Amino acid sequence: KTITTCRKKLGEGAFATVYRGISKESGAEVAIKIVDLIEKEENGGVGPDGARKPTLIGSSEALKKRKEAERKKKLRRKVRILENEITIMKRIARMPPKRRKALVRITDTLANSRRICFTMELLTGGELFDRVLMKQNYTGRD
């Protein structure tokens, strides 16, 4: 839609991975946040020692149903969190630039059954968390 291929991975969190990309519309650099809705098997089914994790063969139907119910519950929770985040970011995008001076603006969202992608302004200058740790005290004006 409005983004090209991702160029460089910027970071990874609990729900998403963020990449640097280019907007097809403007040619400007953007941040692309990609959230996988389908849970990947942790570490590709490999344990810390590099050996394959054992899988349950012939497990009971009740166990399978419980695992599927847990997976669906996690997915619904993740989708609610993302919907809330997107709603807030869209409100921010509608604010006058003067009011959203220190807030990132979302520019586009794309979704399918496997992932949600949204593009945002690319903010440079490092990690906010690192700055908070360095300064230690912030005033309301900061």
Image (tube, rainbow, N blue to C red):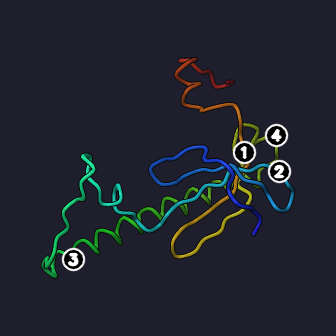
The answer to which of marks 2 and 4 sits earlier in the sequence is 2
Instruction: Give the Cα distance between marks 3 and 2.
Output: 47 Å
Q: Which amino acid type corresponds to the residue marked 2 in the rendered image?
A: Ala
Q: Which residue is mark 4?
A: 98
Q: Is residue 124 above or below residue 139?
A: below
Q: Position of residue 9 (x, y in %)?
A: 60, 47
Label 1, secondary structure: give it: loop
The answer to which of marks 3 and 2 sits earlier in the sequence is 2
The answer to which of marks 3 and 1 sits earlier in the sequence is 3
Label 3, secondary structure: give it: helix
Label 2, secondary structure: give it: loop
Residue sitting nearer the eye, 131 or 10 = 10
Q: Is residue 72 above or below residue 36?
A: below
Residue depth check, mark 4 versus mark 1: number of the one nearer the observer? 1
Residue depicted at 70% across the width and 60% down the height = 5
Residue depth check, mark 2 versus mark 4: number of the one nearer the observer? 2
Residue depicted at 52% across the width and 76% down the height = 113
Label 4, secondary structure: give it: loop
Q: Which amino acid type corresponds to the residue marked 1 in the rendered image?
A: Leu
Q: Position of residue 15 (x, y in %)?
A: 47, 54
Report how many numbered discs are placed on residues in the image: 4
10 Å neighbourhood of mark 3: few (<14), some, or many (≥20)?
Answer: few
Q: Which amino acid type corresponds to the residue marked 3 in the rendered image?
A: Lys
| Residue 105 relative to residue 13: left or right | right
The answer to which of marks 2 and 1 sits earlier in the sequence is 2
Q: Which amino acid type corresponds to the residue marked 4 in the rendered image?
A: Lys
- Res 68 quadrant in image: bottom left
Q: Position of residue 30 (x, y in %)?
A: 74, 50
10 Å neighbourhood of mark 1: few (<14), some, or many (≥20)?
Answer: some
Q: Which residue is mark 2?
A: 28
